[in-house]
Image (cartoon, coloured by chain):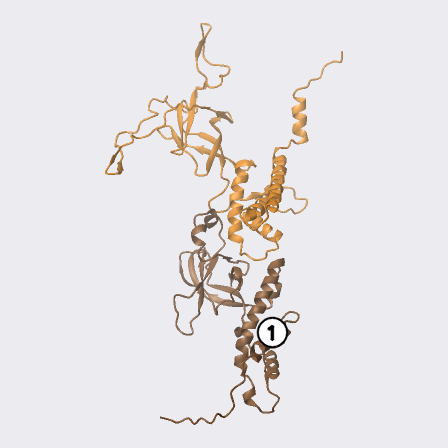
Chain colours: A orange, B brown
């Protein structure tokens, strides 16, 4: 952090956002506080899901002997699933035909479901897992009659290890060669810690403020339709500004991209 | 102007012109009752005007802090008794603010008495630590002279955190709470309005029947 002059924090609390809204409304008491705070928390989740990158989180998971990993409680959707290899993430392939482990359904006795006590099924024939140090990452194969011990690259959909998200049981199912010790998942989180200690980046505050001001009035039948529409437009403009801020190129990034496709040569 | 001056003015206005005519004078306590009701009208009018512009500073001059001890804390819940029934204004505005006596910046959030069931299912219950209160009539001890209203408190800190043992209740005072020799801060024309309302009510009262109708009361 630059020490040239004192700065205000780049992160704020949801309480700050609510107080900022109350100030905009010239309301100097907490009578609407609980309602606005709830709207604010819902707004933070909405921003995290659709408009910001702040909710991308990384989790390291241990795989069970049944080749499953539990999803984190705040999991919404995944971005990448893989394991570490040479300091990078080796992303593995999604396979929607992997069998999801379940017990047998059971039967209804006098209107009550009696579960079947049989063994769990599914995933029993998955390949053996291997350690990270002896990883086999490419499939040995014959090419034009010549044995090739490894591939230069793999075509899409062909891999040595696969996963499938079992959303009903909130777990990931693996198959093939994956190191059991380290599964890495980058995922979209709710962005909210359950103890309320989550902080909000300052660039999100304007969009969050317009969201609260809009939602506060949206379900109030006494407020004119055009007033609600105006609040909606203001919110959409704030969201656009936020998305533009998050997705914009820096000049340096642009130049690097530009130079990557050019070369110097003698003039003819 | 002091409260007693207003009462004296009203009494003087209503008194008969005959010197030492005690029957033609209203008792100050009777005037106070009518004045109290007129004062409530002034408060609600001030609140309504304030609501138009979100500007309630006028009510500040009628508000006073009372320290109320927190009782029967179990977990995060407890209650406290209010010193008098709060002035009934919309949005429970008769209670201006409830704060921790030891830390005035720790202000409680108000909640309608039936709202807990809604908020209990929402994130605000777990993710926000602001203590809350709701108003109820006192159902615990309802004897004569007991406090008539209580606040249910929730989301209070529990040990080992520092407990809240007392709260400051900033309450709008009704006229009964104001001493005869206290200043009554009223806005422009406020004294005038107050006296006119009381006089208007009391002058319409029929005069006492002083005529001798020659009926002899006989004891049985």
Q: Position of residue B147 (x, y in %)?
A: 44, 70
Instruction: Count residues near mark 1 (Cα–Cα under 10 Å), then give few for <14, some for 14-19, many for 20+.
Output: many
Would you place residue A131 above or below residue A45 in this image? Answer: above
Q: Position of residue B62 (x, y in %)?
A: 58, 69
Mark 1 chain: B
* Depth check, front residue: B23 or B72: B23
Question: Quarter of the image holding residue B141?
Answer: bottom left
Question: Dot 1 corresponds to which residue?
Answer: B194
Q: Is residue A170 left or right of residue B22?
A: left
Q: Is residue B125 left or right of residue B36?
A: left
Q: Give the residue at x 44% y 15%.
A: A139
Q: Is residue B62 visible?
A: no
* Depth check, front residue: A27 or B214: B214
Return the residue found at the far left.
A110
Q: Is residue A169 visible?
A: yes
Q: Give the residue at x 47% y 57%.
A: B112
* Depth check, front residue: B41 or B160: B41
């Amino acid at each position: 952090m630059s020490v040239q002059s004192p700065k205000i924090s780049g992160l704020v609390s949801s309480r700050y956002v609510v107080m900022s809204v109350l100030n905009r409304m010239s309301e100097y008491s907490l009578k609407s506080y609980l309602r606005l705070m709830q709207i604010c928390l819902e707004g933070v989740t909405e921003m995290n899901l659709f408009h910001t990158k702040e909710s991308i989180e990384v989790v390291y998971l241990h795989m069970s002997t049944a080749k499953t990993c539990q999803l984190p409680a705040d999991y919404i959707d995944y971005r990448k699933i893989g394991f570490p290899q040479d300091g990078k993430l080796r992303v593995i392939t999604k396979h929607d035909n992997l069998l999801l482990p379940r017990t047998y359904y059971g039967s209804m006795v006098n209107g009550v479901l009696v579960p079947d006590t049989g063994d769990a099924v599914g995933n029993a024939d998955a390949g053996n897992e291997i350690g990270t140090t002896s990883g086999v990452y490419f499939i040995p194969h014959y090419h034009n009659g010549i044995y090739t011990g490894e591939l230069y690259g793999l075509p899409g959909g062909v891999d040595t290890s696969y996963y499938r998200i079992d959303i009903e049981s909130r777990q990931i199912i693996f198959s093939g060669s994956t190191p059991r010790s380290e599964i890495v998942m980058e995922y979209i989180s709710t962005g909210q810690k359950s103890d309320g200690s989550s902080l909000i980046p300052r660039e999100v505050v304007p969009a969050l403020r317009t969201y609260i001001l809009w939602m506060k009035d949206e379900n109030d039948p006494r407020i004119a339709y055009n007033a609600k529409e105006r609040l909606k437009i203001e919110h959409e403009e704030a969201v656009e500004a936020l998305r533009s801020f998050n997705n914009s190129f820096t000049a340096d990034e642009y130049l690097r991209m530009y130079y990557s496709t050019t070369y110097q040569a003698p003039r003819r | 102007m002091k409260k007693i001056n207003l009462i004296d003015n009203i009494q003087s206005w209503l008194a008969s012109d005959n010197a030492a005519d005690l029957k033609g004078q209203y008792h100050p306590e009777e005037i106070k009752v009518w004045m109290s009701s007129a004062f409530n009208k002034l408060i609600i009018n001030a609140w309504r005007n304030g609501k138009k512009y979100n500007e309630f500073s006028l009510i500040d001059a009628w508000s006073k802090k009372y320290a109320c001890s927190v009782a029967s804390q179990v977990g995060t819940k407890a209650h406290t008794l209010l010193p008098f029934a709060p002035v009934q204004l919309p949005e429970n505005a008769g209670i201006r603010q409830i704060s921790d006596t030891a830390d005035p910046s720790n202000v409680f959030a108000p909640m309608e008495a039936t709202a807990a069931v809604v908020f209990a299912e929402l994130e605000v219950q777990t993710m926000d630590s602001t203590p809350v209160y709701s108003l109820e009539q006192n159902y615990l001890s309802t004897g004569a002279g007991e406090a008539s209203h209580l606040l249910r408190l929730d989301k209070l800190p529990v040990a080992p955190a520092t407990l809240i043992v007392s709260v400051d209740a900033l309450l709008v005072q009704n006229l009964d709470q104001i001493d005869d020799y206290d200043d009554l801060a009223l806005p422009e024309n406020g004294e005038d309005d107050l006296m006119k309302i009381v006089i208007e009510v009391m002058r319409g009262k029929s005069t006492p029947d002083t005529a001798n109708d020659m009926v002899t009361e006989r004891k049985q």
